[in-house]
């Protein structure tokens, strides 16, 4: 049985084809104008899900990188302060050696003692350094200065650790417990830096043979031991800096890789889209001309 193709069927077919072509043109126009292949989840459900996943990963990398940058700034400020403290203590050591020399009289030793006391205050001032308005040597009590200038040498911070999360399940401490280096002064008799500096000033003013002997002996040994401890702490800070910088480089690589994947899933290939749009536009115009020829007005059209 032969099926008769009516004019109505032809019209519907032409209109359906034109509608499909127009829909593809509209989609291509949307992609070209937005620059994105996926403008709504229905465009590509899997791609939309992958886009959300990659976007979440990028936000995580961004936060980790921010934590790394803050950590790098923190340890850089720490190293600068420790370097200045080291320079100050080395100057104190030079003065100690000078003061322990018997060729110096008591008047000269009094002057050296005054300079040692000034250097002690300079050490405390460096310990009170801040980064981003936070005291870096106060543990987690970052709003409290660790040492009060011109007063006692008691540490006012705490022993808390400042942590920075630099990856999923990965964190690193960025602060130094300065109390283990500077201590709590002469009252604590802890042989830490401030205690030793106070004893040196006292022995310089002592004016006795025992005081002079202490300057050349125990005072020098204790100060040298504190210099060694400063060197050890600075090495730890250096290792922390290296770890943070390595983490930062790794995060940049991960960000770049995720951005590339996101672009492949989410962004439109502009050259391909423009070619497809031109092809669809030509097909649409051709379909319009062909349809106009196929669907000729009949006598019934005029009678209607």
Image (cartoon, rainbow, N blue to C red):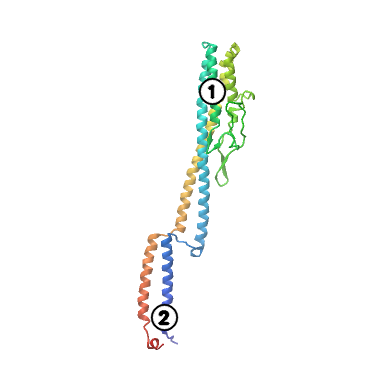
Identify the residue at horizontal 37%, vertical 68% (top origin).
279
Q: Nearer the viewer, residue 154 or 80?
A: 154
Q: Marks 2 and 1: in contact by CB < 8 Å?
A: no
Kindly give the residue lying farthest to the right in the view shown. 188
Q: Residue at x 51, y 61 (%)?
A: 46
Q: How many marks?
A: 2
Can residue 115 be seen in the rendering of this structure? yes
- Is residue 277 placed above or below 133 in the rendered structure? below
Q: Secondary structure at mark 1?
A: helix
Residue nearest the observer in this picture, 186 or 281:
186
Mark pair 1, 2: CA separation: 100 Å
Q: Which residue occupies 52% across, 57% down?
A: 52
Residue 272 on image: x %, y %:
39, 62
**Among the 4 quarters of the image, the one containing residue 21:** bottom left
Task: Give the residue at the far front of this rendering.
Answer: 150
Q: Sequence-wise, which precedes: disc 1 or disc 2?
A: 2
Determine crowd level at label 1: few under 14, some 14-19, many 20+ residues with C-alpha closer than 10 A.
few
* Residue 100 in view: no
Query: In this figure, which residue is indicated by the disc labeled 2?
Result: 11
Q: Which residue is mark 1?
A: 118
Q: Position of residue 172 (x, y in %)?
A: 56, 40
Tag in front: 1 or 2? 1
Image quarter where the N terminus lies is bottom left
User: Is residue 217 placed above or below 3 in the rendered structure?
Assistant: above
Q: Quadrant of the C terminus?
A: bottom left
262 is higher (above) or lower (below) than 134: below
In terms of secondary structure, where does tag 2 sit?
Answer: helix
- Asked whether 127 or 178 is in front, the reply is 127
Q: Position of residue 256 (x, y in %)?
A: 46, 49
Rendering coords of residue 65 (x, y %): 50, 45
């Amino acid at each position: 049985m032969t099926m008769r193709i009516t004019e109505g069927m032809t019209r519907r077919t032409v209109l359906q084809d034109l509608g499909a072509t127009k829909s593809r043109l509209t989609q291509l126009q949307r992609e070209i104008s937005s620059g994105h292949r996926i403008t709504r989840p229905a465009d590509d459900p899997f791609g939309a899900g992958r886009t959300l996943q990659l976007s979440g990963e990028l936000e995580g990398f961004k936060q980790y990188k921010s934590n790394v940058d803050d950590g790098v700034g923190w340890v850089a400020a720490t190293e600068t302060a420790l370097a200045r403290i080291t320079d100050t203590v080395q100057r104190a050591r030079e003065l100690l050696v000078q003061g322990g020399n018997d060729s110096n009289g008591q008047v000269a030793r009094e002057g050296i003692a005054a300079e040692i006391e000034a250097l002690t205050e300079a050490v405390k001032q460096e310990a009170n350094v801040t980064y981003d308005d936070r005291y870096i040597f106060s543990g987690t009590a970052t709003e409290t200065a660790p040492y009060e200038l011109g007063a006692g040498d008691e540490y006012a911070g705490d022993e808390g650790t400042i942590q920075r999360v630099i990856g999923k399940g990965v964190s690193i401490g960025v602060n130094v417990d300065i109390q283990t280096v500077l201590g709590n002064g002469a009252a604590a008799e802890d042989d830490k830096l401030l205690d030793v500096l106070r004893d040196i000033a006292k022995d310089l003013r002592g004016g006795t043979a025992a005081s002079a002997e202490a300057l050349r002996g125990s005072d020098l040994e204790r100060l040298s031991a504190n210099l060694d401890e400063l060197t050890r702490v600075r090495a730890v800070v250096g290792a922390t800096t290296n770890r943070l910088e390595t983490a930062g480089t790794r995060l940049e690589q991960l960000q770049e890789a995720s951005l590339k994947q996101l672009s492949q899933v989410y962004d439109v290939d502009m050259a391909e889209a423009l070619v497809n749009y031109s092809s669809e536009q030509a097909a649409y115009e051709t379909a319009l001309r062909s349809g106009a020829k196929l669907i000729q007005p009949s006598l019934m059209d005029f009678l209607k």
